Amino acid sequence: MAKDGEKSEWKEFLWNPRTREFLGRTASSWGLIILFYIIFYLFLGGLFALTMYIMLQTLDDHKPTWQDRLSTPGLVIRPRQDETFEIVYTIQNTESWDMYAQALDKFLSPYNDTIQAQKNHACTPDQYFLQEDSGDVKNNPKRSCQFNRTILRECSGLNDRYYGYQDGKPCIIIKLNRVIGLMPGKDGQAPSVTCGAKKYRVGKDEWRDDSDKIGEMIYFPSNGTFDLMYYPYYGKKAQVNYSQPLVAVKFLNITVNQDVNIECKIHSNNIPTGSERDKFAGRVSFKLRINSQN
């Protein structure tokens, strides 16, 4: 009997024919509750849409409103096959260095003189290429300066398709990371890159470098400079055809069959020198090992 009573109570709770209540509420009560939640969620959705609309009005399609700009941009090298920053090959083994030559070919193909002449502007060297907006009138898209592959001369791959790797005199390409609005150098002094032996720890308080192994180097363009005309950078959308300036370094007589630890740094009179806490600020380190069977 008790079970039949409980069953009857549940049925009456689900639907009470005397009071015409469903789950304890009349139709008008349910209607008021549903109406309240519809209005409540419409209000929340409208408030969210209004907030997003106001926020989007503060954004610029071509330039970030806020950017955590590094005071010292990093450097990147090419070729680079993985994240180890190691270039290791054997002169007599073509397969060991051909991938580096192919990687440089692919990387430098957009810098061909014919492509640059079609897409970019012949700028005046040694001065910033400023293209400011006129108030609310946006000067977009902005023009970009030509960086012709021939500037890299012996490291352009045009006269030597193997970039010196077959002779044990490899070329390494260096570029400075893009930072919107960055104007490196001041008073007409362009930033430059230099490479040298990197110090590394060999004991608790003992450091060593490979300055006796690195040999002679030459830079292209001369003095390893990034011309001022490639700055400032206005962003990927504003400068669709922007070509990053490059510096090539060619190692002429590096010691073979030994690891050589190398570090390249940016030098500019208005870019702070990187600290030990940020090992990639304004510099890049890599290992170069050229093996020879002779």
Image (cartoon, rainbow, N blue to C red):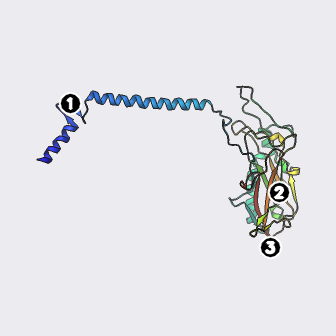
Q: Earlier in the sequence, mark 2 or mark 1?
A: 1
| CA separation in Å, label 2 and label 1 | 88 Å
Where residue 294 sits, quadrant-wise, is: bottom right
Residue 293: image tag: 3
Task: Name the front one of labels 3 and 2.
Answer: 2
Residue position for label 1: 20
Identify the residue shown where x is 87% and y is 43%: 189
Residue 201, percent across and down?
76, 66
Task: Say which element carries label 2.
Answer: strand
Residue 243 higher or lower than 37, as above or below: below
Residue 118: image tag: none
Identify the residue shown where x is 38% and y is 31%: 37
Q: Earlier in the sequence, mark 1 or mark 3?
A: 1
Where residue 270 sits, quadrant-wise, is: top right
The residue positioned farthest toward the front in the image shown: 205
Tell which of 268 and 134 is nearer to you: 268
What residue type is disc 2 on?
Answer: Cys
Residue 195: image tag: 2
